[in-house]
Image: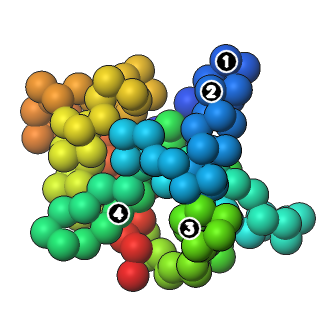
């Protein structure tokens, strides 16, 4: 049975690197498809920023949390919306979490595109992972559609 509460916590170096990417994304500079999002904290109510990759599949946009049940994923789930884009051109976007059976169709192209960036953090998946392996990992990987 997969761990649906998996959270692969980033180390200090990864957090520092992500802060640089977030700062660039908030300034309007995207690196390899990165985008800044801000999500209201579940308990603090404060906006929290993070950098993510936005994946487009069949004209629809998705956010995947490769590290699992991260703070931003929990906050987005609770709030039902995020603020995304640079600080100057941000907009509020509603998010809908996908059911586990719908996730593999999004996770597979996400891993194909960004494996170089998320390897080791996406439940052991690689671009060569089988459909069965992706289905097995899906419950531990939050996926949101931007609506």
Cα separation between marks 2 and 4: 23 Å
Label 1 vs 4, first from the N-terminus: 1
Label 3 vs 2, first from the N-terminus: 2
Q: Which residue is mark 1?
A: 13
Q: Is disc 1 surrounded by few (<14), some (14 to 19) or many (20+) residues within 10 Å?
A: few
Horizontal and vertical percent for residue 110?
27, 45
Q: Quadrant of the N terminus?
A: top left
Residue 62 badge: 4
Q: Secondary structure at mark 4?
A: strand
Relative side of 99 to 43, left or right: left
Label 1 vs 3, first from the N-terminus: 1
Vertical arrangement, residue 99 with respect to residue 14, above or below: below
Q: Secondary structure at mark 3?
A: strand
Rendered residue at 72%/20% (across/down): 12
The residue nearer to you, when weighing 18 against 39, is: 18
Q: Secondary structure at mark 1?
A: helix
Q: Which residue is mark 2?
A: 17
């Amino acid at each position: 049975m997969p761990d649906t509460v998996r959270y692969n916590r980033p180390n200090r170096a990864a957090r520092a690197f992500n802060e640089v990417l977030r700062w660039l994304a908030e300034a309007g500079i995207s690196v390899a498809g990165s985008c800044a999002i801000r999500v209201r904290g579940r308990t603090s109510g404060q906006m929290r920023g993070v950098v993510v990759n936005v994946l487009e599949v069949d004209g629809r946009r998705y956010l995947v949390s490769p590290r699992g049940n991260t703070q931003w994923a929990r906050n987005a789930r609770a709030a039902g919306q995020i603020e995304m884009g640079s600080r100057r051109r941000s907009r509020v976007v509603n998010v809908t979490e996908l059911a586990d059976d719908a996730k593999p169709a999004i996770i597979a192209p996400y891993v194909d595109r960004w494996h170089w960036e998320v390897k080791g953090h996406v439940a052991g998946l690689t671009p060569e992972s089988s459909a069965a392996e992706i289905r097995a990992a899906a419950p531990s990987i939050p996926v949101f559609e931007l609506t």
